[in-house]
Image: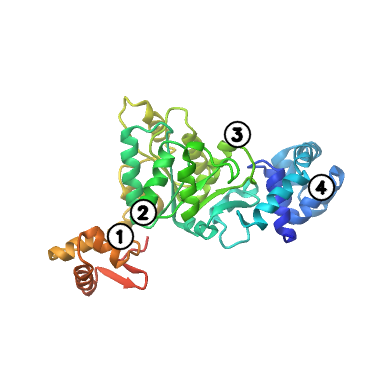
């Protein structure tokens, strides 16, 4: 048997649709366990009475209007979904360790989701390694058109490569086009990447990206707020976008049509106070019309380089204090160029620089003496890499 708290959160993920704020209010006021007991009792008067006794009627009326209607409508939506077979299947997916559940009180919980308030997920279903969610503390969401142009593909690779070298996790939605390219580029860089689904983590969508999503789950994490078996719907895609925006420190839109789901993600990020960047394209390109719209409406800042993205997150000039070499020998130059602002092994540095491991170690030792690099049990990185 699952602990009562875990069971209640499983049932909440089954009963409520993503972004259901009244469910979030009940969980906040009464806790997951008691609030679910109230739902199962399906007694509107009891819920109203307990809300009144808790002093939360005013906030309920302010946000939702008529509390009687809010409660009765919510119960009408929630109760039919709490079928025993649905809960049994969800529980089995956990007890069989096919998937895991991350709860708001867990260390792996992405803290950015707390900014969603009552609209935060009840819990997260994870395919893969739940520990990978810790990388969300330093992450950038990259989103864009499902029909990426060659320009969009190239730009995405460039930004993901640069952000990966700065130690950022790449968050996206696993869709065709820019999403998939962003995930693929992160995998190629051996950098963390997280995909957020609009359906259950056992219903990887789109089907054409199942191999890619499987690879992400094998190395990092594919997540959803919906239980296994849930189908992706238009509403769920729009709500999924709020998670992409909330999880990340910034959102970067590479390509987007005039009406695009990426615009929705950017708007979510903006409403949460997260910085948004948009990459400009040719003024004649429909694929960049949405990016130009975001820039023109001041929803996004124009972004053309990695320093632009870093400035969005940390403020202008953040990278200026990172030391750069002046006069170095050829081995030192090659080793320094192969370094990044995240730890790299000697083997990887040597391979990237085209040096033997002996040559790379000599060069790195020289760079360390010049205070340009630092070493630890994790490997080597540029000194001042505090991003």
Q: Nearer the viewer, mark 1 or mark 3?
A: 3
Q: Is residue 305 above or below residue 235?
A: below
Is 137 on the left or on the right of 161, as rendered?
right
| First reached walking from the N terminus: tag 3 or tag 2 | 2
Q: Is residue 346 above or below residue 122?
A: below
Mark 2 secondary-structure assignment: helix
- The residue at the point 67 percent across, 44 percent down is 21
* Mark 2 nearby-residue class (10 Å; few <14, some 14–19, many ≥20): many
Residue on which the image places disc 1: 340
Q: Quadrant of the C terminus?
A: bottom left
| First reached walking from the N terminus: tag 2 or tag 1 | 2
Mark pair 3, 4: CA separation: 26 Å
Q: Are marks 4 and 2 in contact (CB under 8 Å)?
A: no
Residue 164 numbered mark, or none: 2
Q: Are marks 3 and 2 in contact (CB under 8 Å)?
A: no
- The residue at the point 36 percent across, 73 percent down is 377
**Whole-percent x, y for residue 251 in the image:** 44, 45
Is 378 on the left or on the right of 337, as rendered?
right
Residue 233 numbered mark, or none: 3
Mark pair 2, 1: CA separation: 9 Å
Is 182 on the left or on the right of 119, as rendered?
left
Q: Are marks 2 and 1 in contact (CB under 8 Å)?
A: yes
């Amino acid at each position: 048997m699952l602990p009562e708290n875990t069971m209640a959160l499983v049932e909440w993920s089954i009963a409520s649709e993503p972004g259901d704020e009244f469910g979030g209010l009940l969980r906040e006021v009464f806790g997951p366990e008691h609030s679910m007991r109230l739902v199962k009792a399906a007694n509107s008067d009891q819920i109203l009475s307990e809300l009144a006794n808790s002093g939360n009627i005013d906030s309920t009326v302010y946000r939702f209007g008529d509390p009687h209607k809010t409660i009765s409508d919510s119960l009408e939506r929630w109760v039919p979904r709490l079928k025993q077979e649905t809960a049994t299947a969800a529980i089995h997916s956990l007890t069989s360790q096919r998937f895991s559940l991350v709860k708001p009180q867990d260390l792996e919980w992405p803290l950015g989701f707390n900014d969603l308030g009552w609209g935060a997920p009840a819990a997260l279903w994870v395919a893969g390694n739940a520990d990978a969610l810790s990388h969300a503390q330093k992450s950038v969401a990259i989103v864009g058109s499902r029909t990426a142009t060659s320009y969009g593909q190239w730009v995405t690779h460039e930004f993901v490569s640069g952000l990966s070298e700065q130690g950022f996790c790449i968050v996206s939605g696993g869709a065709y086009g820019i999403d998939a390219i962003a995930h693929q580029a992160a995998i190629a860089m051996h950098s963390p990447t997280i995909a957020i689904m609009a359906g259950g983590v056992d219903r990887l969508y789109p089907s054409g990206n199942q191999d890619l999503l499987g690879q992400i789950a094998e190395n990092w994490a594919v997540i959803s707020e919906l239980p296994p078996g849930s189908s992706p719907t238009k509403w769920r895609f729009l709500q999924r976008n709020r998670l992409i925006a909330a999880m990340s420190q910034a959102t970067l839109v590479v390509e987007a049509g005039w009406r695009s789901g990426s615009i929705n993600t950017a708007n979510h990020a903006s409403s949460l106070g997260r910085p948004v960047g948009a990459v400009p394209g040719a003024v004649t390109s429909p694929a960049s019309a949405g990016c130009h719209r975001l820039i023109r409406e001041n929803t996004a800042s124009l972004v053309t380089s990695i320093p632009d993205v870093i400035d969005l997150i940390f403020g202008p000039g953040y990278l200026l204090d990172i030391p750069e070499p002046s006069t170095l020998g050829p081995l030192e130059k090659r080793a320094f160029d192969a370094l990044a602002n995240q730890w790299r092994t000697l083997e990887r540095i040597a391979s990237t620089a085209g040096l033997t491991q002996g040559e790379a170690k000599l060069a790195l030792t020289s760079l360390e003496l010049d205070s340009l690099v630092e070493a630890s049990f994790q490997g080597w990185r540029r000194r001042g890499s505090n991003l």
